[in-house]
Amino acid sequence: MIEVEIRVRGHVDEDWSNRFGGLDIELTADGDTVLSGPVRDQAELRGLLSWLADLGLELVSVTTGPLRKSSR
């Protein structure tokens, strides 16, 4: 598993967490949404990114790294 942080332009509904594979949703003061948490692999990450594009959300950034021990 890898830890991922995906930032998109605009606020999404916080109730959509289950639609994003259970990723945490943070709405920022500057109007962006940050999705963060573990994903299984690069294939799952690509699927999430594709789905965000299908929703018409503008991708701002994607950061990945090793899963931290404090994560789920």
Image (tube, helix red, strand yellow):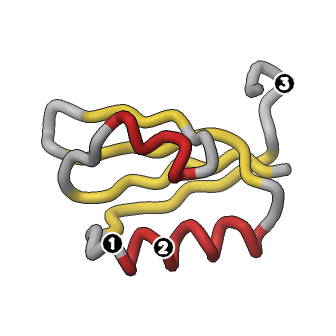
| Residue 16: quadrant of the picture | top left
Marks 2 and 1, how far apart in space? 6 Å
- Rendered view: 41 above or below 22: below
| Earlier residue among tags 2 and 3 | 2
- Compare residues 53 and 64 and report the one nearer the observer: 53
Q: Secondary structure at mark 3?
A: loop
| Earlier residue among tags 1 and 3 | 1
Residue in view at x 38 percent, y 80 percent = 54
Q: Position of residue 15 (x, y in %)?
A: 38, 35
- In the picture of the structure, the residue carrying the numbered disc 3 is 69
Considering the image in quadrants, where does the C terminus appear? top right
Front: mark 1 or 3: 1
Residue in view at x 28 percent, y 41 percent = 13
User: Any mark on residue 41, and which?
Assistant: none
Marks 2 and 3, how far apart in space? 28 Å
Residue in view at x 61 percent, y 40 percent = 22
- In the picture of the structure, the residue carrying the numbered disc 1 is 55
Front: mark 2 or 3: 2
On the picture, is 44 further left or further right than 24? right
Q: Pointer 2 and pointer 1: residues touching (CB < 8 Å)?
A: yes
Q: Secondary structure at mark 1?
A: loop
Dot 3 alpha-carbon crowd within 10 angstroms: few under 14, some 14 to 19, many 20 or more: few
Q: Position of residue 12 (x, y in %)?
A: 27, 47
- In the picture of the structure, the residue carrying the numbered disc 2 is 51
Tell me which amino acid carries mark 2: Trp
Marks 1 and 3, how far apart in space? 32 Å
Q: Position of residue 55 (x, y in %)?
A: 33, 72
Q: Secondary structure at mark 2?
A: helix
Tell me which amino acid carries mark 1: Leu
Tell me which amino acid carries mark 3: Lys
- Compare residues 49 and 5 and report the one nearer the observer: 49
Q: Pointer 2 and pointer 3: residues touching (CB < 8 Å)?
A: no
